[in-house]
Amino acid sequence: MKLSHTALVHAPRARVWKLVTDVPAAARCVPGVAAVTPSGAGKFKGSLLVQLGPVRLVLDGDVALTATDEAAGKASVRADAKDSRLGGTVRATMDLALVDKGEDTELRITSDVQIAGRIGEFGQPVIQRKADQLITQFAECLARTLA
Amino acid sequence: MTYDYHEPDSLAEALELLARHGEDAHVIAGATAFTLLWRQGLLRPAHVIGLRRIAALGGITRTGDRLVLGATTTHREIERSADVARYCPALARTFASVATVRVRNQATVGGNLAHADPAQDPPPMFMALGAEVVIASAQGERTMPVDELFVDVFTTSLRPGEIVTAVRLPALAAGTRATYVKFLPRTADDYATVSVAASLRLADDGTMADVRVALGACGPTPVRARSVEDALKGTRPDARRIADAAARVNADIEPFDDVRGSSDYKRDMARVWTERALTALVESR
């Protein structure tokens, strides 16, 4: 499933870059993320709680910055997680691009998300909506953090 | 995978169980929604609290021109109730149109609301009739307009520890008419591609004194079509005006693409079925 999102953060590009490439700091801006801890070689372990009505997913897994190009303002993130209680895995590759807009920075996120197991029962429209909400709140939090 | 099943005899006991087990508990009545989510493996509560033995939560009460539906009243009971038919025949027909008899014999009105599937039939009709939801918790009772209950797909504004106990329907002004229509291109027991509930009352001079329109399956929650209502209020409805008003429904909805149609198709069908619902009501004089 391919998703793309754009959000405007009211802060200069260099500051946004510093925050989004600091995985534990950026993760604090993702609603539902519990402690993110380094696990070596640029990798981190963490967990994400996603609540959809009565259904609670606890996605435990690894996140890594797989590529960064500060001059171009581009970074790639890979996340592999599973919900062991309900059974299901989420694998996501996210390409981030930061575009200088004067006093603001446009954050473009293109994601390729593969969902296997029970989580997939929700269907794309619901998952897409949840992803939209997560990324909107992520961008709002980045803006607040940098304010 | 197992859970502890609790079947309290009183609301107080149910609320106490819910407060004690918190997020580990799931409340059921007819369990039609729960069973699907459980079998899909999406719900794994440690405790399930069944409400069906609580007598105070069942039954249909008519007080004057008002109607109260207890939360554990089944769809079938509402469909067949003489009190409901006298209150508003379209409300009885809405419940009669839900899924299949087997489902209607089991599914309850409170469960329907708490489940908050945006494609369910009763919520738009409740919105069109100005219903209120009665909610209980250990802290007491509160009511809210049904419009405020739904916040997202499968998500309500119920707080932790709260249970829906009843739906209250207000007295309808004399001459109020209502209807519920749904587009079912696949099978009669399917969820609707789009559904429309409407109620209206014409003044003596033929102008639209009251009008409410609500749609199901057109976004993350059932939704009031206030743009349509505003375009009609106070006007003398004719075919042209109804068609123009129905076209405004697009401002109120945000349908998803799914197996029942693309978002664009549902937008078009929402307009068509809104126009049909309103036309039927105006012509039923």
Image (cartoon, rainbow, N blue to C red):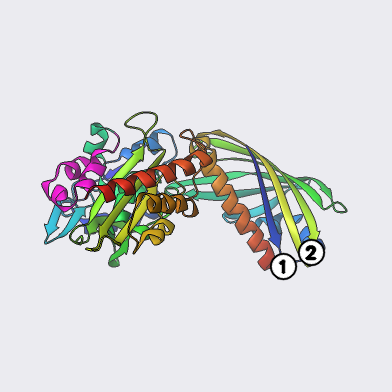
Residues tagged 1 and 2 counted as in contact (Cβ below 8 A): yes
Q: The residue tagged with tag 1: helix, strand or loop?
A: helix
Tag 1 subunit: A
- Asked if residue A56 lies left or right of residue B124, the reply is right
Q: Residue at x 21, y 50 (%)?
A: B285
Indicate the amino acid at tag 1: Leu
Rendering coords of residue B138 (x, y %): 29, 64
For residue A146, the mark is 1
Mark 2 falls on what kind of element? helix
Q: Quadrant of residue A62?
A: top right
Location of residue B200 with respect to B37 vertically, above or below: below
Question: Can you give x and y, in whole percent of width and height, for residue A90 in the image?
Answer: 60, 39
Magenta stretch, residue numbers: B75-99
Q: Is residue B90 magenta?
A: yes
Quadrant for the N terminus of chain B, please: top left
Q: Is residue A45 magenta?
A: no
Percent of width and height locating residue B100: 27, 32
Q: Residue at x 20, y 40 (%)?
A: B76
Residue type, label 2: Arg
Given residues B258 and B196, the one toward you in this image is B196
Mark 1: few/some/many CA within 10 Å (<14, 14-19, 20+): few
Residue at the disc numbered 2: A15
Residue in front for this viewpoint, B51 or B88: B88
The answer to whether A25 appears left or right of A123 in the picture is right
Could you tell me which chain the residue with mark 2 belongs to?
A: A
